[in-house]
Image (cartoon, helix red, strand yellow):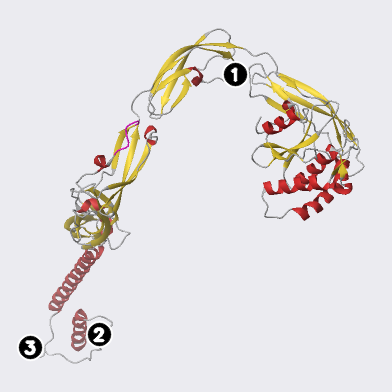
Amino acid sequence: MSKQSKDTAWEIEDLDAGTTEENAAPVKERPVRSEDGGRGRSGSGRKRRRKKGAALVLVLLLLAALGLAGFAVYRDYSSRMRMRAVAEVGTQVLATDFLRDPSKSAAYEEPGFLPDTAHPGEQELTIRSGLYRYHVTLVTEDTVAPQAAAKLLTILYGERAEAADFVTDIQDMTQVSVSFAGRPDFDRIGTSQVALLLTDEGGNVTEVLSELTVSPVLPELTLEAGDPVPGLSDLLVGDFADAEIISAPSEDDMHHVGTLEILSGVQGEHFLTFLHVTDTKAPSFSVQDLQCFASSGFTPGSFVTEVSDATDLSWSYATEPDLTSEQPQEVEIIGTDEGGNTSSRRAMLTLTIDREAPVMEGVKDMVIREGDTLAYKQGVTVTDNCDTDITFTVDAPDVDPNKEGIYRATYTATDRAGNTTQQTIQITVLHRDISIDEVNALADQVLADILTPDMTEMEKLKKIYSYVYNNIGYENRGKTEDGADWVPAAYEGLVMRTGDCLTYASTSKVLLTRAGIENIDICKIPTSRKHFWNLVNIGEGWYHFDACRRSDHPYLCYVDDATLMAYSAEHHNSHMYVRDDYPEIVGQ
């Protein structure tokens, strides 16, 4: 290789040391002169220079690698953690909440530690994440205003109250102070509005409106049952000349446990006092021995004779008596008053087992016409040797009063002990030539002419009586024999307008029934002459109603029993009847 070519190659390598392949500019070959007058460099010199250049490159590369590594570490350290965080008071703040990258891990330096966020402020925390240790700042803020419910306050005249007494259910994450927006007048009787300011540790303020009532009377009072009703002197807490009691409980109210109200008036304002009546005293009572039927329905109170207590008592057994035993047995009676106080007494009980069935009287076979109403229990009485509460039923599922035929009905009476009596009767339904519908239609025509919608029941009764009495002439047609049919008799009264007492009673019956007035038939005790009339009930009990004409022209429209019996006694017992066959009549 010529000298010229060797000089050119070194230059390129030297330049390369300061450049890269990409940005190296082309080098123009040119002769290089040395200081010794044109001689080239020696081979050993060139080798040393090459070694120094390579070492320099290695150093530079190492420094670059270290710089890149340091940069990477710095970048990882500085980008991993937020150095300052803000949280609302009461929030739980974890170490991981400071991480920018949630995929990383972090923990407070002290195991199990959690920062206190109960109050606003700043605190320095130490967090470890990976190989790094951080000193961060946590700022706790209170940005939510407090909330509370107003409490309506009542105080007695002369008392004072604090601002906090007017609110309840305060809700905030920090301590809240309560103050008056304007101090209320505690000496003013009556009710006024009070404004309260609620301020938390963050400086947030909420205004709450409440009410203050200054009362000159006690809001509550507790007395023992039986005490007198309290007066003004028991209620007032000051001297008020115009004070009055507007309403108060009665003396009887004071004998029952509960809460009563007393309304007072002072200076034009009304004030309520709740009076609590209590009973704290045990009752005192006496008992007697008892002998009775086991099924008589006796109760613990049946043993009690004399009672002393301010309230009502209820009675019970300590142990229920044996109702199947006829041997004398001791029972313990417990009396409990309205206050729950109890006392007990002992008595002897001797029972008799009831083995006797009830007795039915007046049950007999019946004969009616088609369309008649069956009064199964009319004239029937049931008695028992010890019970008055007797179950009395009539079972007649196959009876059809609108169809001719012979039917059966069974009467059953059962007392408390389960003793039962039964009787079966025969019901004969006879054919009727004139239908009830036809008679009803005739009656409706008459009522349309004599009644108006605005009439009272008594006015209707008098109109019907007057019509029957004045429009039917008396003539003995022999319709009073046993089993006589009322429907043809009513037809004769409405169409022919003549007939005997059965005609009058039957015509009255259909008119009263179609007018909606309750009525039943009644007849005289059979003698040589019979007589029929009606009983009516317009809501005042049963009264006699007899529109049949008589020679002395009596007015028997709405007559009590005593009056009719007096008339009957003066007229050959004209209206004597079997009392047990009919309901109780007014005046009996």
Depth check, front residue: 203 or 186: 186
Read off the residue under disc 2. Answer: 24
Depth check, front residue: 37 or 517: 517
Which label belongs to residue 296?
Answer: 1
- Give the number of the mark in front: 3 or 1: 1
* Amino acid, disc 2: Ala
Residue furthest front as drawn: 552
Which quadrant of the rendered structure holds the N terminus?
A: bottom left
Q: CA distance from mark 2 to mark 3?
A: 28 Å
Q: CA distance from mark 3 to mark 1?
A: 155 Å
* Amino acid, disc 1: Ser
Residue 518 appears at what percent x and percent y? Answer: 72, 41
Q: CA distance from mark 2 to mark 1?
A: 132 Å
Q: Is residue 81 left or right of residue 437?
A: left
Depth check, front residue: 558 or 9: 558
Residue furthest left as drawn: 36
Region in magenta: 225-230
Residue 503 appears at what percent x and percent y? Answer: 85, 40
- Give the number of the mark in front: 2 or 1: 1
Looking at the image, tell me whether mark 2 or mark 1 is earlier in sequence order: 2
Q: Is residue 305 left or right of residue 282?
A: right
- Give the number of the mark in front: 2 or 3: 2
Callout 2 touching callout 1 (CB < 8 Å): no
